[in-house]
Amino acid sequence: MSRTWLPLTIVVLLIAGFIVFLSPNDSGDDATSGIANPSTKLLPASIEDLQAAPFVDEREKEAEESPSRLTISTPSSRAPIEYATPSEEGLLITVLDGNTQKPLPRAEVMVIDTGVADMRLLESEMSLSADFERVFENLGVIYRTDQNAQVRIPFAVDDHIIAGRTPTHFNFSFDVDKNIDDLNLYLNPTKILRVQIVDHHGNPVKGAPVSLRVRTEKSVQDFTTAYSNEDGFADLKLFQLLLMELADDETYAALLVLHHQPVEVRVHLNELPKEPPVLILPEVGQVEIHVVDDHGEKVTETFLVNMNLLLPEDTYDSQLEFIPRNNFREHLTGRTKNGTAFFPLVDFDQRLHVTVVSQDGERRANAFGGGPVRNGGPAIFTLIPKAERPVIVGRVLNTEGVIGANLSLEYHVKTTSDGGNNSSRAGNIRTDENGKFRLLMEDGYQESAIRVLTLTMRATKKKPKRTTVTDLSYFLAPGENDLGDLVVTVPPLIASGSVVDTSGVPIRGAKVRLQRKYRHGEGPDDFWWNGIWELRTETDREGEFAIRGSLPPDEYRISATHDNFIEGAVKITQGREGILLVLEKSVNVHGSFLLDDGIDPSTLEVTLQTLHPNSAGDHKYFKQNLKDQAKFSFQNMPPGPAILVLRSEIFEEELFLHTDLLLTNQEDTQTLAPIDLRGALQTIRIWVKNPLGELLPKFHIWPSNTRKRHSTQENPFVTITRETGLDFQIVAPGYRSQRLVGVVGDRELTMQSGFVVSAEISNLNRVPNGWKIRLYFKALTGSSGEKADSRLSHQIADFSPTAKPTYFMDSGTYSVRFIAVGDETTGNIQRKWLKDDGTTIQVADLALPQNYIFTFNEDDFAEAIAED
């Protein structure tokens, strides 16, 4: 799996919302401290935060005897912590109190190695779960500090994410450099905010999930979650720096019951309440979900449950998979116990979609139906989960036949489709005590012509990495697909060598990758180099590296990169040793433009391109939008001649060109003199309205000085240009196209309604029950005979025996297509294009309605709806 650390870093910042302090010990290595950005926008809150809070049937006898007392089942109790054995070599962590700097012995240190973890699962957990500690417990390795508040953990394959906690402290850090030897982790003291949850009769509610929600003008975010006890009390753990960051008069936290139509009580963080706030649950109905086997017997193993609350426009496909109409669908999640899960639901008579998935993800089932009815019984769903995707199983052995028990393995599945497109999936799996592993294949596993599985045991200081490669290019049946015994061996050497700077000093931590040459034409420059994900490494303390694996015949090279250096590369053949890669120091380029007041710099795009290739043979090409005060900054640029270009972001009009720029790396940063464009540029604003004077929500526009067209939902449309008196062509579906001539500054345009077109279908009575006919008009030429923009298409509404649809269209030539539409009321929506028979119409510039009569080909219709 390819990974980009920026999104994950942002996710961590948004989830936590508090500041992290790191301080490396005096180890002689360079390391920096990290501070989370307090101004980062928070992620939208989601009911998905309930994932860790199952509603299962743990109702006590008292609750059964007193139906008026509501019990929401508590989460599955957390398993006892199993502490990992400290490492003899690796990163030494010292855990300290963030206020007093005193050591915190017997603290728990939770570690996630980003080079080993399944990063997609990690990012998903971090973005959805407000119970941040549980994320580390589920996905990390937990150590305990000694009496000196220290613990040593193994060096990471990639960077670490580390959290520390005691009963009274917590903090975490991300992107911990794997090349440092010592780290001080400062934990922040926590406070407890107690709340109480009661039902609408005033009785305590057990097991209700409660979160601390922070709400600002533009966003909401849930931070920490707790569950009420038998007396209805829940204790929310608040972090000191979280309180410092968010405690002001403008920002407040609301206690949120994670429940459909949540109940909230506002609490200001700068003054926590002395008495527990009380949250009162409204009257609720109940949904019961039963998971059974083929014989109708309840399945005792735990299943994850997801229940979507649907809107009227929501649909589902033939496998009852939910198809949301937007990204803001409310849903509840939980777990079954002894085959049953219970959900309280406030919104009665609600359409529901339920999915159950085994904890290993291998079996699942879906159901669709109505929710509880007010003053009626519960809504009951009974599901029989089946294996829908293949599971790869096998046993790992070494060359001596020793079973690889309890091993951490990196897996990489590379697929190549019939069309030659490549995709990869990677992550981490573990073998059990018998050396066996299980790997669930993702969707699309049957769609690739070539599929290869690589399992890798990562290298240690004493042993090189070991791998096994297996061909999976055959049918994989749902359920287990046993590969038998797989022997991991030391792969052959591809290349080895060292990376140094121009002074010959070894560069530690340089990223070294094997790249393959791909062609897209016959010309000498018609190629590019693409890295092979599983064949990469980093240099050690001496700047040395070795890459092992097997390669098919082709052209390859080794490339190396490091911060503040330019990429270097050298072509290789299999088994080459003693490679010396010399990296040249890069330069950071800063500059700015002087613009007139009223010109928005964010709509301008600046590009910096090097003219001479670097040692890797590449021309560097960078572009970005101008920042505040019209500034720009390019990092890690190679020295030498370059071109600086300023363009309009929308139409890419060239506004400024600097061709004699010379970049030098004598200093880390090169600051260019401000470039004065005052008086050279102008802003054009165009308001587009309908005949009633209302702004159009969407239209298409292109100027006379470029062939580039632009579709916009911004009204007014704004662009910046050097030219005066530009002409613009403007088109909007349902209106006549119009041209603005000699536009300078601000202009307003009122579009005229299009010409009335009506349509009839002569053999509409031959459409089978459950199907409709839809006409699709696509513009071929405009009103002046010019070729129309391919995006300007018009669709006529569904036809029925009583409906004769009309539409307003611009004059011009249109192609006509028929679409067969399945009955949407069944939930099994189908849209089938009939064959294009070349039918066209000519919409004339006439005031009278223009009527067209069409006849669809019944054989084509029957053939289309018979397709799978």
Image (spheres, rainbow, N blue to C red):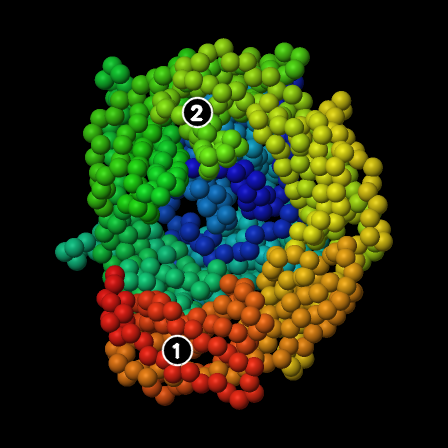
| 781 versus 583 height, above or below | below
Point out the image quarter for the N terminus: top left
Point out which mark residue 798 bears.
Answer: 1
* Residue occupying image coordinates x 49% and y 68%: 780
Three-letter amino acid code of the residue under disc 2: Glu
Kind of element beneath mark 2: loop
Q: Is residue 759 visible to us here?
A: yes
What residue does disc 2 label?
555
| 58 versus 767 height, above or below | above
* Residue occupying image coordinates x 44% and y 42%: 120
Asked whether 138 or 144 is in front, the reply is 138
Spatial CA distance of label 1 from label 2 is 56 Å
Kind of element beneath mark 1: strand
Q: Is residue 247 visible to us here?
A: no
Based on the displayed image, in which of its 4 quarters is residue 378 positioned?
A: bottom left
Asked whether 441 or 124 is in front, the reply is 441
| 67 versus 341 height, above or below | below
Three-letter amino acid code of the residue under disc 1: Asp
